Image (cartoon, coloured by chain):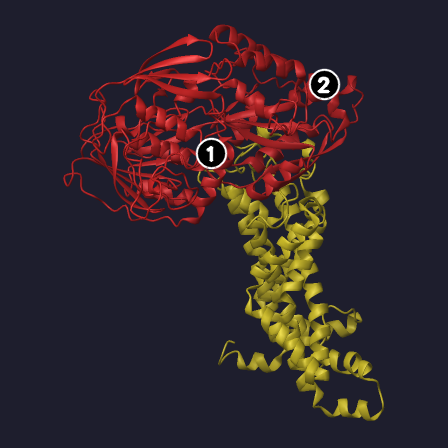
Chain colours: A yellow, B red
Amino acid sequence: MSIQDPSSPTTWRRFRDSYFLYRLQRDRRAQICMTLFVAMMASLLLTPWLAPSNPYDLAQISLLDSELPPLWIAGSDPAHLLGTDAQGRDLLSTMLYGARVSIAIGFGAVLVQSLLGTALGLLAGYRGGVIDTLLMRMADIQLSFSTLMMAIVIGAVVKAAFGGAFYGDYGVAILILIIGLSEWPQYARTVRASVLAEKQKEYVDAARVLGFSNYRIMWRHILPNALAPIFVLSTVQIANAIMAEAALSFLGLGMPETEPSLGSLIKSGFDYLQSGSWWITLLPGLLLVALVLVINLLGDWLRDTLNPRLHRARHEDSR
Amino acid sequence: MRLKTIMLGLLVGAQLLPSMAATALADDDKGITLRVAYDTAPVSLDIQEQLSIGMLQLSHLAFDPLVRWNRDLEFEPRLATSWERLDDTTMRLHLRHGVTFHSGNAFTATDVVWTVRRLKRSPDFKAIFDPVERIEAVDDFTVDLMTRQPYPLLLNLATYIFPMDSRFYTGMSADGRDKSEIVKNGNSFASSHLSGTGPFEVVKRQPGTRTEFIRFPNYWDQHSPGNVDHLVMTPIAENATRVAALLAGDVDFISPVPFNAVQRLRHADGFELVTMPGTRITMLQLNEQRVPAFRDPRVRRAFAYAVNQSAIAERLLKGFATPAGQMSPEGYAGHVAALEPRYDLAKARKLMQEAGYAEGFSVTLMAPNNRYVNDAQTAQVALAVAAMLARINVTVEFETLPKNQYWAEYDERAADMMMMGWYSDTSDSANFFEYLTFCPDPVTGAGRYNASEYCNPQIDALVRRANLTMQPEARARLLRQAERAIHDDAPFIPLYWQNLAWASADRVEIAPVLNVMNMPYLGDVVVHPR
């Protein structure tokens, strides 16, 4: 029985026999989470067809429709299932589009973090010495700041250097970079630890004896064996990145008002909480919680699945 | 130019931690106590050190002006009992007899002369007092104010003259410095000692956290209904904290009330909320140097027709603003009742078509996004305007910035449309024109905040003529004419006058002492014992 990488395409047969599927079939919680996750992803992919209106098209929104309550409350408009926000945007559509932005930033940021962190961690772990010390002290220094603070600093510098208009136009890309750059040490440390363990093993010595280049040994021999923790870490990090984006947007450093993410939606509704329009903040908030929870639970399950040793230990010590 | 100093005051205030030291002082200790929480603390006790709303509020507590505005925006005699014009440039003011300063000195014409001369030296006030050429005491209770040119707003200026105790502030202090010197943010004699004629004496002051006053026993105004014996001022910069302090009974009176707490306070038992249409106009200026299309008055008018001010005021600001169709609020000389908000989408589209822009174009818009107090929601307002302009096919790329960054961009005229809010320093229409629509002139400072970069010498001439017209009716006619002309030319989109709000425990009768100048006359406030 081999551990399969769930994201790389293998033949159907190998997938059907995999431990991954075996575990999934026997875990009700994982099934529910997986279903929800797939449903969410599908609806976000199909948003332009599913959403009742396009909240980015300003000509479609009217201030006179503002703050309509959701369907189950008196005074609602059947055209707006979950009501409207302060600008008169359909809340369901805005949430769907907002979640798309949040997810895109989450995945994008994790891609940046993992590429950067893996490369640096691999280098540090394999080479050791001065390079290792230098890179790991850099990581330590960066970890001693809160990532949110790092992100705020980077965001402020970008804003000052390129101007707010630029920030508005490339909001998604900039947020991906900001969150990516401020979280790479997580990956670097994890990868370095795995590499240090793998480096001692005979197959690495064998590869070295065969005369393979360092580059080849690092990427083709050690890395595949250090991948499992990266996948587990990634699920946690996607959820973290979505939260970081929401926090930044809530602080006004994230997505502009015209293209709200879940975080900026929560923020813009916050002002109306006291005037009774709770749905503008609460509904996107619930969606954010659901999204992050599902991803976290899936990540948790994946960690157990990919690490049988941890699975056995789980009953005695949950972490 | 009160705007900048108000911002400065807010910045200073924001750094002060809200001190909740205003703990309960039982009424029976020293008679009736009123605990007040404003958003900022007065930066100094020298009322001529800074021109800001906070300092003017202090001035009304510890001093009295020569005249003050009443609620109907008329002049009410205070230390000046009557006045007359001797000629176009001279006004004679008759002063009140039997007034004493907190120090015990008697109030005479010498004090008024001394005060005005000091105002003309004060960095913050000298611009406002520039029209005054000199002031002379005729006898002990009569002074003559002389201006360089005929100047119709002398009485408006007199609301800024709070006579100071000239004998108290003359001489050398213990550390050998002139007692009358004005030091900005420094340590002068006047910044820590105070002697005025006002209803309250300062008894204790912890700068930035707490100021305590007691009723001045020899206060001249025996007709004042005010019955507060002891007044405690505690600044609370954080909006939610200020409201919570009132609701919890830690303070009796708060100002300003944040816009999102208005509904809550309106329905809360045991509290009184007073709102008033404000006089601060918020507008969007259309920059015709940056956008050639804005040089066509039809395009500017189309923009003005496309924006639905009532929807913004009603829906977005929850009725907490008065939709504006002009700059001058009601009660101002230049206010034209007929100029109502002119939302008409069909007309806007037609005008765009006539101007050859049926396909629309793209513009940039900048607005401040600080969500403090009653300036709230400017970013939301900007977004709503963008949506309204989308209906005439105009694409708005908009950007919102924190206030302190915004003003730097504003001075650069960095966007095609910029948001501006303006109080008239003199409570007069001419001030709006002078700063917001006059042809920009860096030497005289005219059009300093004209980000429309609009220039119409005819309208400027009308306002200049009004400023030399002494006869109020004729002057108002000229100002109304100017207001109409600028309305037709539409170099900006007027949006709304933000309302003002105050709240108190309901045993405090605040309504009679409040006014649109946002200077509560707390000397006259009546508080019912618990």
Asked whether the residues under the numbered discs 2 and 1 touch, taking CB atoms below 8 Å apart as contact, a structural biologist would say no
Q: Tell me the quadrant of the picture where the N terminus of chain A can be found.
A: bottom right
Rendered view: A229 above or below B386? below
In the rendering, at what x and y percent does residue A197 appear? 66, 86
> Secondary structure beneath disc 1?
loop
Q: Quadrant of residue A146?
A: bottom right
* Type of the residue with mark 1: Asp
In the rendering, at what x and y percent does residue A270 appear? 50, 44
In the rendering, at what x and y percent does residue A243 appear? 58, 57
**Along the horizontal axis of the image, is A112 left or right of B67?**
right
In the rendering, at what x and y percent does residue B20 appear? 31, 48
Rendered view: B190 above or below A112? above
Q: Using the image as rendered, state which of residue B126 and residue B229 is in the foreground.
A: B126
Which residue is denoted by mark 2 in the rendering?
A: B297
**Along the horizontal axis of the image, is A284 left or right of A101?**
left
Marking on residue B492: none
Q: Quadrant of residue B96?
A: top left
- Mark 2 vs mark 1: which is more N-terminal? 1
- The CA span between labels 2 and 1 is 38 Å
**Along the horizontal axis of the image, is A207 left or right of B427?**
right
Residue A203 shows in the view: yes
Extreme residue in the right direction: A211
Which residue is denoted by mark 1 in the rendering?
A: B124
Rendered view: B189 above or below B394? below
Q: Using the image as rendered, state which of residue A112 and residue B333 is in the foreground.
A: B333
Chain at numbered mark 1: B
* Type of the residue with mark 2: Pro
Q: Using the image as rendered, state which of residue A13 and residue A231 is in the foreground.
A: A231
Classed neighbour count for the residue bearing mark 2: other residues with Cα under 10 Å, few (<14), some (14–19), many (≥20): some
